[in-house]
Amino acid sequence: MTVKRKGWVAILGMTVALAASGCGSNTSNTDNGASNSNSNSNAANNSSTSPAPSGKTSEPVTIKFMQYTASGSQEETLQEMVKAFETANPDIKVKLDIVDYNNYYTKLNTQLASGDAPDVFEVGYENFVSYAAKNTLKDLTPIIAEDTSFKPEIYKGLAYDSFKYDGKQYGVVESFSDVVLFYNKDLFDQKQVAYPTADWTWKEELEAAQKLTDAKAGVWGTYSPIQFYEFYKTVAQNGGGIWGDDGKPTVNSKQNIEAFQWMLDKGGKYKVSPPLNDDTFNQPDADLNAFKSGKVAMLRAGIWNFGRFADASFKWDIALEPGNTNKAHHFFADGLVVAGKSKNAEAAWKFIKFMSSDPAVVSKRIEKGWSVPAVSDEKVMDAYFKQTPPESKKVVMDALETLVLTPVGPIPDKWSDLTKAIGDELEKAKLKPNYTAEQALNEAQKQVEKLMEK
Amino acid sequence: MVGQKRLSKAVVILGFLFPSLAGLLLFQLIPMLSSAVISFTDWDLLTKARFVGLDNYREALQDEQTLTSMLNILKYIAGYLPSVLALGLLFAVLLNRKLRGVQFYRIAIFIPVITSWVAVSIIWRWLLNGQSGLVNYVLSLVGVQGPVWLQDFFWAMPAIIAVSVWKDLGYVTIILLAGLQDISDDYYEAATIDGAGGFQKFWRVTLPLLTPSLFFVLVISLINGFQLFDQVLVMTNGGPAGSTSTLVQQIYENAFQSYKMGFASAQSWILFVIILIVTIIQQQLQKRWVTYDR
């Protein structure tokens, strides 16, 4: 009864804002068509492939699984993985729903609100904390403790622990990625500049960038966007941070202002990056396209772009990011969690374990160039390192030694407000004449303090 | 007997009304009412809704972003409304003449209206690109260095106003054109006999008799202005740093990106009340300036 009533409210909720403000309905249901047909066809597959085992009398359970990382290019890979799971566990069926990232969290939240949530779903680390804090996930600690065949050591320690909240294990890391410095070897060779090394700092980066920049040819020495994610990493490279050890915001610390000034100066003062108000570079993916067409010599970019650059017309490689006083690298982890209200927690756990650590799944993930599995088995990872370019693929692992987690701080439930409050101020400093880095961060500090009071 | 007859008549009427009534109830009235209820809670989709009284409204009216977005809307309307009405009137009068190929011009001016806002916005974003856009190229031919329109704190809003006027002009023009053609020639003949010149005819005959159409266009344009959303979302996404953000966009972000359903519902109701008040004021004022000839 309560479930039904909640479903009703959720449907209303979805239509509420749209109806009340009368702004057309083209924003909401864009994903439904594609993903529904997807899950339907998959459900059909399931019923035909896995016959119930003769030994057991119990009805097969069906678990619903929703995720986004396969959307766009890896749907088939994921379907193969799911099929492999069903063959190994004939008493469990999986209903798969792949949703594109832009619509994923909206759909997930509506389903959670309506009580019709998937049993297992995928979350990124920064969102995981918010779901755990809102008590919407199932605590897997007791189930894991009972499962004698499960060994957490098979995962990379830090990646595994990132899905722990308040001492409880709520999920298991499935794959991870980080951000490193990509560089165009051909451009370095032309200008006879030495390739970046692990001990480079901002100073060396600037010197190299000044030699590499060729305004006439439209080639820029280095590029990194000015936005919130880049900001929290760059300040960490200068020994700063969004939060102090005592959990108070330190957005306008001296180190942060210095670091932000450096971000702005590359385009503004030194002119080794495009002008701050360059329209083209402010479009999504413009920096990646510019790198691929040989217009940027050094670019900070995610390792998920390896595939995109694989057929570039020049030689390229990766290196650790230059820092100032510290090294710091982005770290993003995707994990699988179980909905708090799921009635099939046991089956869900089996599925999570399989999807994150089964050798067949892990090697398929590598073979298809999908993402980096977070397992610590050297043999498995060898296959990953052997895939080139880039030659220095080990850098992906080296970067993990100096990672910065997404700074959710003491207000994980206000992550999107935090991102926006700081992001807006960064944009002001970037585009507004005479609005200094210091002014922007002072204002951002005030905004964050206000967020904490609420 | 009579009562029964009346009842069966009512059933028949309701039966015919049911299809449209059901849609209205299900997709308009019930969501509206439930949003009123939600606006008094702190519902975030995930945790249980708590009743918070007027907190959302209080917070919204003190919220800097909400206030900025209202201010932005006022700026927008201040630029958009006079331009679209004046230009619409101008083109309506021009297209009301017996020009050669007038049909073609009438169609041409209406084409932007039936084009999708998203497609139009994307194309204008290219045209207005600060470094490689056509607009700045044309300006450079006459020696003017154009700004980076959509990333400039001053120019972003005028750019959005200009694009909106360009797109909505056809609609306003067609409504006013219909209004013009509705004015009987008798009035003009009488005015001519009385010795009125062209300007006097326009000022004393055309304009007063056009006021019902003008009033309609004014109300519709104002409501559309308050609901400014599509073009902003695509062209600037509220940027730079919130300087073109609008109330509907705030509602959308709060509801579907931050999942603050209660807060977003309160904002929706605030918007509703604003539009309601403005429309009531207009209804009252129309007595003073709108002339109905019949």
Image (cartoon, coloured by chain):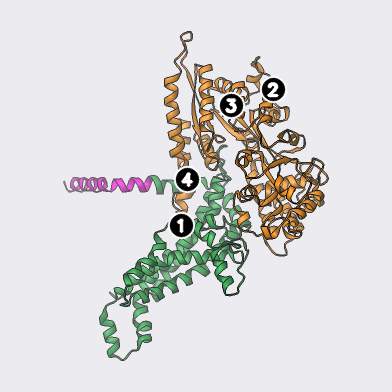
Chain colours: A orange, B green
Do the residues under discs 2 and 3 have CB atoms within 8 angstroms? Answer: no
**Looking at the picture, which amino acid does disc 1 mark?**
Trp
Q: Which residues are magenta?
A: B1-25
Instruction: Say which residue label 2 marks.
Output: A379
Q: Give left or right: position of A308 versus A439.
A: left
Residue B117: assigned label: 1
The answer to whether residue B55 is above or below residue A101 is below
Among all residues in the image, which is located at the extreme bottom? Answer: B195
The chain ID associated with circle 2 is A
Instruction: Say which residue label 4 marks.
Output: A28
| Between A440 and A187, the one nearer to me in the picture | A187
| Between B267 and A144, the one nearer to me in the picture | A144
| Between A132 and B91, the one nearer to me in the picture | B91
Instruction: Say which residue label 3 marks.
Output: A364
Residue A377 in view of the camera: no
Please provide percent x and percent y for residue A62: 48, 23
Does the magenta run of residues contain A76? no
The chain ID associated with circle 3 is A
**Looking at the picture, which amino acid does disc 2 mark?**
Lys
Q: Give left or right: position of B74 versus A267.
A: left
